Image (spheres, helix red, strand yellow):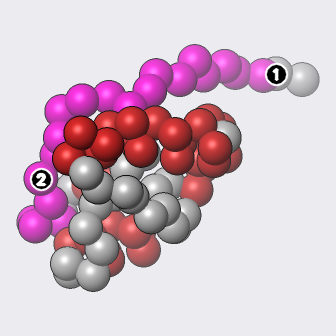
Amino acid sequence: MSESVAYQMGKDTVLKSLRAIYHPLSINPTLIYLPTKRGLQLLNNGEIDADAGRIDKAMAGYTNLIKVPYPLSKFRLFIFLY
């Protein structure tokens, strides 16, 4: 799970959402929060089963990944100026 997404959404919200997604499959997910590059390397090498909270660009070059085309959330981004 992306550290930044977990921070933005709140870790409790992320865990509740993923538990709801996996519940029909009788899977109870265990979450670890990793920086993007490390998480995708572990996933690509088969050391973890899944990853979430990544953008498409970050996934380029990882040949063993399969994207699930379902958004976990949508963010509203803002620009702040001084």
Horizontally, residue 18 falls left or right of residue 48, namely: right
Q: Residue at coordinates 54% horizontally, 64% vertically from top-left? A: 33
| Residue drawn at point x = 49 percent, y = 54 percent | 2
Residue 37, located in which quarter of the rendered image?
Answer: bottom left
Of 53 and 60, which appears nearest the observer?
Answer: 53
| Residue to which mark 1 is pinned | 81
Magenta residues, dominant SS class: loop
> Is residue 55 visible in the rendered structure shown here?
no
Residue 82 relative to residue 35: left or right: right
Badge 2, how many Cα within 10 Å: few under 14, some, many 20+? few
Mark 2 or 1, closer to the camera: 2
Cα separation, mark 2 vs mark 1, equals 38 Å
Residue kind at label 1, given as amino acid type: Leu
Mark 2 residue element: loop
Residue 61, compared with residue 12, is above or below; it is: below
Residue reaching furthest right? 82
Magenta region: which residues?
A: 62-80
Q: Position of residue 34 (x, y in %)?
A: 51, 67
- Left or right of 6: which side holds 29? left
Task: Look at the numbered disc 1 and give the secondary structure of its residue.
Answer: loop
Say which mark, if any, is on residue 66. Answer: 2
Q: For this rendering, which residue is in front, 32 or 19?
A: 19
- Is residue 27 visible to us here? yes
Contact (Cβ within 8 Å) of mark 2 with mark 1: no
